[in-house]
Amino acid sequence: MLPFRAVALLVQKFGGTSVADPERIREVADHVARCRRRGDQVVLVISAMGKETDELLRLAHEVSGTRPGREMDMLVTAGERKAIALVSMALASVGVDSESYTGSQAGFLTDTNHMNAKILDVRAERIRVAVDAGRVPVVAGSQGMSTDRDVTFLGRGGSDTTAVALAHELGADACELYTDVSGVFTTDPRVVSSARKMHRISFDEMLEMTAAGCPKPAMRSVEYAHRQRVPLHVRSAFTWEVGTWVIEEDPDMEHAVIRSVVTDLSEAKVTVSGVPDRPGIAASLFRRLADADINVDMIVQNTSQGGITDISFTVPHSDLERALEICEAQRGEIGAEQVTAEPRIAKVSVVGAGMKSNPGVAATMFETLANHDVNIEMISTSAIRISCVVAEDDSDTAVQVLHDEFGLGATEF
């Protein structure tokens, strides 16, 4: 555990499962009361209860096929406003003085991009005043007010980013992200029973893990914390045990070659076949995709044969239909022969800062998959990550054998 001052200022974020019902909300209130009794100052950031955001989105789709972004933001942020009021009431019942604040009341200024707004500034004077007065501010996560003075929603996982931004602005000792898991694991423990919780991990490794598909914490929050050097503590709101610290890399420490194996089933592969191999073709195709706000992940272009090549890339499942429409529209323009899609793929990645100084990780990964008849369709790398696209049906096997091969189940982190 990281050293704190005798009295710590903590920003504690509680996700939807942590405040899913009245019993869970009372548990959170009891926890805050315990923190206060030991002398800590606490600022809370609260997500919508349980699956409430999903329910609000479902209602919007049932009500109308036309859903203006401004009204969608007004709708989905209602879940957090409801939750903060209930948490403040629960705190009052255990003798903790608190006040609830919407994102705009807490001073979050954002851009005008509805449903996925970015934080421009945090003017947290009201929150500082409340803390100095001995109260616990209860802030609605994932929301703010735009430069056009409209309510904005930061997108999925935005409450993590709210908490990190507030921790930086207040100079907090740490930002604690409470969720339904006890920390960050070497891989998904539902797939590999020997997966182990890591006691600490570097920001760089955590960023690569979230980019490769690790769902918690949200990647934007890790980027923000890394940039502003805010220590993160990912931990359980159900067991209250010490979780995983995400901190600056210690240059004097020797790092494990591989820290984790991450799998991502959220992407699909698109292949544009029979593409003329000449300058400007790929630029034209990917510019159209970028203009449509389609996030392209891995890209592979095959070796040209007779002046013809194939281009494959991955996109989120949610963008697959639009990506196919754009590629089909471009097919005639660029002279391609065919556009196909493979939705049942998995991206399997190994991540570890130690691979920078240990050659042979890629060879070991590829050999291990080959020895278990797992075919590799695409490959991408960074300094501390190697990712392979495999068939979805092979994903669990790939994760298990790689986790075993790199000895992650037998290593203390």
Image (spheres, grey):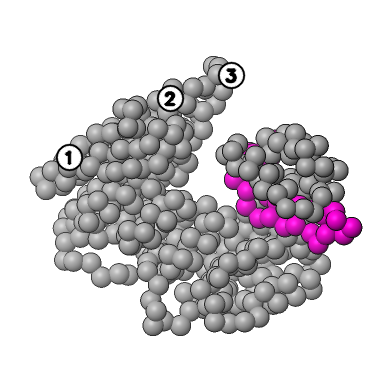
Task: Find disc 1 in the rendering and name its residue.
Answer: 126
Q: Earlier in the sequence, mark 3 or mark 2?
A: 3
- In this view, the residue farthest toward the top is 63
State which quadrant residue 252 falls in. bottom left
Mark 1 neighbour class, 10 Å CA radius: few under 14, some 14 to 19, many 20 or more: some
Q: Give the image location of residue 352, x and y in percent.
A: 54, 72
Q: Earlier in the sequence, mark 1 or mark 2?
A: 2
Residue type indicated by callout 1: Arg
Q: Give the image location of residue 269, x and y in percent.
A: 73, 49
In the image, which residues are magenta? 295-321
State which quadrant residue 224 falls in. bottom left
State the separation of the CA atoms marked 1 and 2.
26 Å
- In this view, the residue farthest toward the right is 306
Vertical arrangement, residue 324 with respect to residue 355, above or below: above
Residue type indicated by callout 2: Arg
Residue at 40% of width from left, 25% of height from top?
74
State the separation of the CA atoms marked 3 and 2.
15 Å
Q: Nearer the viewer, mark 1 or mark 2?
A: 2
Q: Are the residues at dot 3 and dot 2 in contact (C-beta closer than 8 Å)?
A: no
Task: Find disc 3 in the rendering and name its residue.
Answer: 65
Q: Are the residues at dot 3 and dot 1 in contact (C-beta closer than 8 Å)?
A: no
Residue at 70% of width from left, 36% of height from top?
326
Mark yes or no: residue 169 visible: yes
Q: Give the image location of residue 284, x and y in percent.
A: 68, 44
For numbered disc 2, what is the local secondary structure? helix
Task: Find disc 2 in the rendering and name its residue.
Answer: 70
Residue type indicated by callout 3: Gly
